[in-house]
């Protein structure tokens, strides 16, 4: 069985973070493992508090996984502070896992900050150069690239700017733009556009976590990057289309819609 690791924050309400990652991994038939970088007390409408895990415990979690079950891909999500980022970067340089997908989580769906603003430079300097793919949404890409994004060409320019920070590829996600949801992938040589109809729903909690985890899952399964993004886009679009009406705010997406709809026999074929 193919294996995959998430390094991220924990969402106790189950819709985002490590919980969303593990659900996505399972939906793709992978054995998922996790390193908790932060514990987040949150639900569908607010973030109550965050407790960062000690850097040495982050390092020991990574060691425990990688010395025993080397993953076929690594998804990195919420890293809220400088010390945690440096701990993760140090262990990634040591163990050199393949297929690293970095989702630079800065805000929750309700707008609450999940990354200390002063830590963005550390993310860019220490973590981004280790990534095979970085997947910012438009607000995150604006912060990282230092430009305003109003068009697809702006998305391309932001992707080029972030690529120069040292990662192998960049996917700027267009969920915050108007019209259809178009994402722009820059692989260092050419651009690829992935478009899906915009689904008008408030229940989008954890979509960024789910999308990046689906891409990492497809890379773990051996797909080339454009195909991995294309299939992940289809997966997250289905999860949003069948999102769950749970909670008082932005409800979670449906990670197991196909499984619940068609059963284990169909997914095992």
Image (cartoon, rainbow, N blue to C red):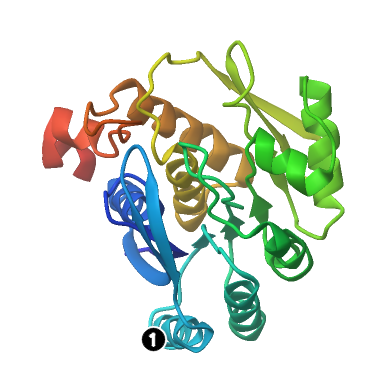
Residue 61 left/right relative to 159: left
Image quadrant containing the C terminus? top left
* 149 lies above or below 73: above
Location of residue 125 by image quarter: bottom right
Residue 70 left/right relative to 187: left
Image quadrant containing the N terminus? bottom left
Q: Mark 1: which secondary structure?
A: loop
Residue 95 visible in the current orientation: yes
Q: Crowdedness of circle 1 by 10 Å Cα count: few (<14), some, many (20+)?
A: few
Q: Residue at x 52, y 39 (%)?
A: 111
Q: Residue at x 67, y 43 (%)?
A: 140
The one of 67 and 40 positioned closer to us in this rendering: 40
Expressed as whole percent of the image width and height from the top left, the position of residue 203 reads 35, 27
Residue position marked by numbered label 1 in the rendering:
68
Expressed as whole percent of the image width and height from the top left, the position of residue 115 reads 59, 57
Residue 122 left/right relative to 200: right
């Amino acid at each position: 069985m193919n294996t995959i690791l998430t390094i991220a924050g924990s969402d106790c309400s189950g819709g985002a973070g490590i919980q969303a990652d593990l659900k996505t991994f399972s939906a793709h038939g992978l054995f998922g493992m996790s390193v908790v970088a932060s514990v987040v007390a949150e639900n569908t409408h607010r973030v109550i508090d965050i407790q960062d895990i000690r850097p040495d415990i982050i390092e020991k979690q990574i060691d425990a996984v990688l010395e025993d079950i080397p993953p076929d891909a690594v998804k990195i999500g919420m890293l809220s502070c400088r010390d945690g980022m440096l701990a993760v970067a140090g262990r990634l340089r040591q163990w050199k896992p393949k297929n690293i997908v970095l989702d630079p989580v800065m805000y929750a769906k309700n707008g609450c900050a999940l990354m200390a603003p002063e830590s963005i430079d550390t993310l860019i300097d220490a973590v981004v150069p280790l990534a095979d793919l970085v997947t910012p949404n438009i607000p995150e890409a604006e912060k990282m690239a230092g430009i305003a994004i109003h068009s697809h060409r702006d998305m391309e320019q932001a992707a080029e700017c972030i690529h120069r920070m040292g990662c192998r590829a960049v996917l700027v996600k267009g969920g915050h733009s108007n019209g259809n949801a178009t994402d722009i992938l820059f692989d260092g040589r050419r651009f690829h556009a992935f478009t899906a109809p915009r689904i008008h729903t408030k229940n989008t909690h954890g979509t960024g976590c789910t999308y990046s985890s689906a891409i990492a899952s497809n890379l773990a399964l051996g797909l080339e990057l454009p195909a991995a993004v294309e299939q992940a886009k289809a997966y997250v679009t289905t999860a949003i289309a069948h999102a769950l009406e749970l909670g008082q705010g932005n409800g979670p997406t449906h990670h197991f819609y196909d499984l619940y709809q068609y059963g284990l026999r169909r997914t095992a074929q």
